[in-house]
Image: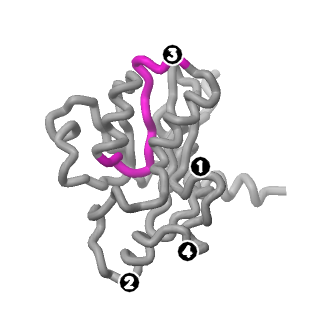
Amino acid sequence: MKIDFERPNWEEYFMLQAELVKLRSNCMIRKVGAIIVKNNRQVSAGYNGTPPGLKNCYEGGCDRCKQRINKKIESGMLLDRCMCSHAEANAIIHCTLLGIKIVNDSILYSTHIPCLECTKMAITIGIKDIISVRSYMDPYNYLIKNKTVNIKLINIDKLKYWTKLLNYTIEQK
């Protein structure tokens, strides 16, 4: 007897985790979450925000974000002036902090396509695939344009389906 049973596939499951991680972001402009997965196991997570010990972005810790909010600079410009560490960089840094050394052939799930710097870091530690639900194409990210790393965008509608189901499950008594 076959039972009707559904659950998220691996890509949906890990992307839902990245979406959850982004809720910890303290950036005023764009909340981003990222996780690194090896053999269908999460090994690290990161979200964007100011480094420990610095004033949070929403507390005025990042002048670049203030300029973006005031429309003095455009999206993607002056990224080197941002005080926030990117979610992907934080996930990579956490591998080091936790002593995780074997990241070759892993997958980076990020809520947005990473910038050039984060893509370089991901390639350096052995990430083979980057999976995302939102396109944020850094105009200078030629590594993605030249397919140095495999990039895949998945349909956000399937994530919306699972979040609605999750909401229903949480509200059940």
The residue under label 3 is 102
Which residue appears at 25% of the width and 53% of the height? 137
Q: Specify the segment rendered in magenta.
A: 101-115
Q: Are marks 4 and 3 in contact (CB under 8 Å)?
A: no
Query: Disc 1 designates what residue?
Result: 21
Q: CA distance from mark 2 to mark 3?
A: 43 Å
Q: Which residue in the structure is indicated by mark 4? A: 60
Disc 1: CA contacts within 10 A as few (<14), some (14-19) or many (>=20) = many
Rendered residue at 29%/74% (across/down): 73
Q: Which badge, 4 or 1, is on the more N-terminal residue?
A: 1
Q: Nearer the viewer, mark 4 or mark 1?
A: 4
Q: What crowding class fits label 4: few (fewer than 14 Cα within 10 Å), some (14-19), or many (20 or more)?
A: few
Q: Which mark is residue 70?
A: 2
Front position in the image: 61 or 139: 61
Q: Is residue 149 magenta?
A: no
Distance in Å between CA atoms under marks 1 and 2: 27 Å
The image shows residue 51 at horizontal and vertical percentages of 57, 52
Mark 2–mark 4 contact, CB under 8 Å? no
Q: Percent position (x, y) of residue 171?
A: 76, 60
